[in-house]
Amino acid sequence: MKAGKRLAPFALGLVAMAHAAAAQDLNILTWEGYAPETITRPFAEASGCNITASYVGSNDDFAAKLAAGGGVYDIITPSSDTVPLLSQAGFVDPIDPAAVENYAGIYPEFSQSPALNLDGITWAVPLIWGSVSLIYRPDMVPGTPDSIAVLFDPAYAGKISMWDDKSAIYWAARYLGYENIFDLTDEQLEAVKAKLIEQKPLVRKYWASAGELTELMANQEVYVSNAWTGLTFKEVNGLNKGFTVAEFNPKEKSEGWMDSMMLVKGTPNQECAMKFISYMQSAEGQCALAASTGYFPVNPGAVAACMDEATKKERQVGNIDFVKSLVMWQQPARLDKYIEVWNAVKAAP
Amino acid sequence: MRGKSVLARRSALPVLGLFALPVGWAFLLLIVPYGIMVAISFWTRQFPLFVPDFQFGNYLQLFSDPQYYTVILRTAKIAALVTLAATCLGYPLAYYLVFVIKTERLRALLYMLVIVPLWVSYLLRTYTWKTILGTDGALNSALKWLGVIDQPISLFLYNQWSMVITLTYIFIPFVVMPVFAALENIPRNLIEASEDLGVRPFGTFLRVILPLSAGGVISGATVTFCLAFGDFVAPVLVGGPDGTMVANLLQSQFGAALNWPLGSALATVVLLIVMALLWLSARLDRAGRVALG
Amino acid sequence: MALEGVSKSYGAVQALGQTDLVLNEGEFVTLLGPSGCGKTTTLRMVGGFEFPSTGRILIDGRDTTYAAPFDRPVNTVFQDYALFPHMTVAQNIRYGLTVRGANLSPAEVSSRVEHALALVGLSKFADRRPAMMSGGQRQRVAMARAIARRPRVLLLDEPLSALDVKLREGMQVELKRIHRELGITFLMVTHDQGEAMALSDRVVVMQAGQICQTGKPEELYDSPANPYVADFIGGANLVKGVWKGRDRGRDRLALGQGQAEVQREGHAVAGLSEGAAVLIGLRPDNLLLGDGPNAISGRVLEVLFRGDRIRIEFTPRGIAAPIFAEVPRAALRDLQNLGPGSPVTFHIDAADILLFADEVAK
Ligand SMILES: Nc1ncnc2c1ncn2[C@@H]1O[C@H](COP(=O)(O)OP(=O)(O)O)[C@@H](O)[C@H]1O
Ligand SMILES: [Mg+2]
């Protein structure tokens, strides 16, 4: 998700293949913005491992890239809703939590989540988290919107955007009042599909990256969209375009996500990989990543000293109740079906 | 006799060696991957993996599920529109360069200007159209400044028309080049002969110039159609919600959807369509060539 | 058809100087001259592909100087035929008959195509493509296509130059026959004097964008207007000489250093005074072996076998340049061992000596 903040205006998924790993190298397949110099340099000094990062455009890219020939990457950082699929497909090795420094400091709601732990085996270690809410142009949308309905309102025909992702199904399902959005029945999926196809004429463009949404907003192409909380609205307002955008959490709830680190099966650089996983639970790692991305740390203990109070509040540090106000992403029971529905929506005229 | 055959054998070896490399290369990097692709198209998907198999379910799905064949048809429609537009614009341009421009240097200069965009990144050129056609774009600003409109028109961007416009712009040089060559190859005295026989310039164009440049038109149109058919950038950059084309579908089958068997089946169908087109084009061209001698 | 004071310049290059020319109905006129002398330019102006810099072009009394090619009652047989490669022979011929201005019924069109094909003897090839035909056949198609339009004037630019010698002679006969059968005015361009002489009613000899002389082939041969025409038509040995005066209708001439003296019969050349430098033209054909009046002796340089004729190159006494003579083979029978170095004597009939004022010497 939250791919390239201001980089590629779209995600082609054309990522330079990292060269074959040498002894002291660590190859990470991750999101743009997740391997800044503020992490790679101190980590290299501390561990002697050089990070080479490759990037994905969506959670679905991880499995696709590993299927196309693993062995190139050592660590991947999918969201928790994709973690089960990857272990199920046999692309990853389990991780021993005891070998991860500072593991105990992670919110147990995350580290002990069933998505990351299967039959008593730990497959992933939390990295960072955040939410997806709605943004809009107050000068163009009268009143104070409080519902997902704004995404389906013909009043904004041609001025609506949505993330080009299967999560569009989650939004439509919540709008339709379904509770079990990760395990919809066939009828419910049909209704969701119909709703999304009905919405298509209102949609100007499905955005593929955060950078593209920022551009769509800044160029006045769209007035409402779902967006990475905290990111897009700050970027757009920072451009001083003569208008502002605002964020809100709809009454049907916003979405929450949490990215985790996983160990690619049979990695020859296991030692470096484990060092990296531990490093990312340290104060340096958590604060650097939170600063680089604008998202929320998963290890409140670690950031206690390296974050000021205002930032802590903004980044929901210690406010695990915030998670309860969100619909946390889970792997859909029938992931393939969901992807097919989303593709069918996009293919529809 | 003996000596001769020894000689022949001796010289055959280096020749074989000379060709072994490119032939082996072509085999390894072209034929083998196609073979693998076709093989996988018969496999079965067991999400998130696929297992070797031999069944036609994937092809069946392509032709029964509207989400696949509508995209193929849409892609064909857009590619056809692009081909038509690029030909209709590129031909007069080539004609102008060959027959209207009188000085050789000006002609060479203008030809370069037509071709030079090919040196500029394809992405950049597509992206440029976004800034021209957008709500805050150059076109809307110009129309507003001229007083033609007072509210920006959003119809210019993020729909199939913007894709057609962008792709047309991109592919015009691919039409101009072969048509230019074809027109330049028409002996000038054929045009004089036509006028000498009482046929006016427009009749001469229809009856002599057009048929004799048909080969250039065919190759330009074929290249344009095939490239437009396989394009995946324009839908992403300037296409709207209804802009998905075959290449995007392929990308998602091999990516997000993790359905290589279906993706391979789709790729095989696309390959067959393109090959059929090239075959047709070659046939048409050959027919024309035979006619010309 | 007439050219009145027509000239053509391409920038600083004058391709054709002021030219007047009148073609009579049904006449076969040939523009003859070396390459680059302005023949094609003239023809193209008549065809409408170039416009004259000055002057007028009249066809049937109508001023067509600036008319477009498709508005003129003339048709051209192009040098390299310019057949439409994408059409069959019949389609090529039909091409000019189905235009709006032609006003022909389909039946008329067919009959004209058939007639034109029959005229050039290609009836069997109606459905062939030009690419499948020989050069001679293409030449005929080009002819057929042009004449099917029944032009007032048929223009032919070096129509036979692309054919090999044997074919060319056959086509000359064909051309002559077609001209006779059609009765159309022909204006042909060639650099081949033999072709011009053989085919034309009238030949226009050109040099460097100017007409040198116009006349029937035999007039040009018998009384060339200048040494250039004399040499170009039939060929001539041009020898510098001195005019010694004229009595009883004969010019007395000294060749070279006065070693050879000849008497010339014929018209007086105006403006000559005694001792004036002149050019004397001796056609190789007219030099007769053996002693006689107007004899020239010398030594043989070379003997060249030419089939029924023998070409002898010799250095006459007192004349710097060698002279060529062509004699029938029979005349040489008695002189079996004539070879380089042998003494030889030629004579020439007084009436056959050509005389020109030597412009250069003045
Ligand atoms: N289009 C042209 N531009 C410039 N000069 C030309 C052109 N056409 C002919 N000439 C010149 O005019 C002269 C006569 O040419 P042309 O009529 O073709 O000669 P010919 O047919 O007797 O060989 C030549 O010196 C030629 O170079
Ligand atoms: Mg010429």
Image (cartoon, grey):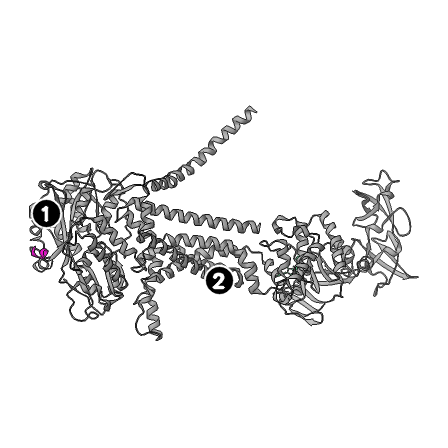
Location of residue C177 (image quadrant)? bottom right
A321 within the magenta span: yes
Query: Which one is in front, A263 or C129?
Result: C129
> Which chain is mark 1 on?
A
Q: Position of residue A29 (x, y in %)?
A: 22, 46
What segment is highlighted magenta in the picture? A320-324
Ligand number 1: quarter of image = bottom right
Query: Which one is in front, B288 or C346?
Result: B288
Residue with the mark numbered 2? B92
| Farthest right residue in view | C248
B209 within the magenta span: no
Location of residue A276 (image quadrant)? top left
Query: Which one is in front, C178 or B67?
Result: B67
Q: Position of residue A43 (x, y in %)?
A: 16, 46
Q: Is residue A119 above or below residue A331?
A: above
Q: Relative to A281, is C106 on the left or the right?
A: right
Q: Position of residue A1 (x, y in %)?
A: 20, 53
Q: Which mark is residue C22?
A: none
Q: Secondary structure at mark 1?
A: helix
Decide whether the magenta segment is chiefly helix, strand or loop.
helix
Q: Relative to B18, is A10 on the left or the right?
A: left
The amino acid on which the numbered mark 2 sits, given as a three-letter code, is Pro
The amino acid on which the numbered mark 1 sits, given as a three-letter code, is Ser
Q: Residues within 10 Å of mark 1 (few under 14, many from 20)?
A: many
Q: Position of residue B189 (x, y in %)?
A: 60, 58
Residue with the mark numbered 1? A111
Q: Judge whether residue A8 can be spotted in this image.
A: no
Q: Judge whether residue C282 can be spotted in this image.
A: yes
> Which chain is mark 2 on?
B
| Farthest top residue in view | B2
Query: How far is the residue under mark 2 from the one under mark 1?
Result: 67 Å
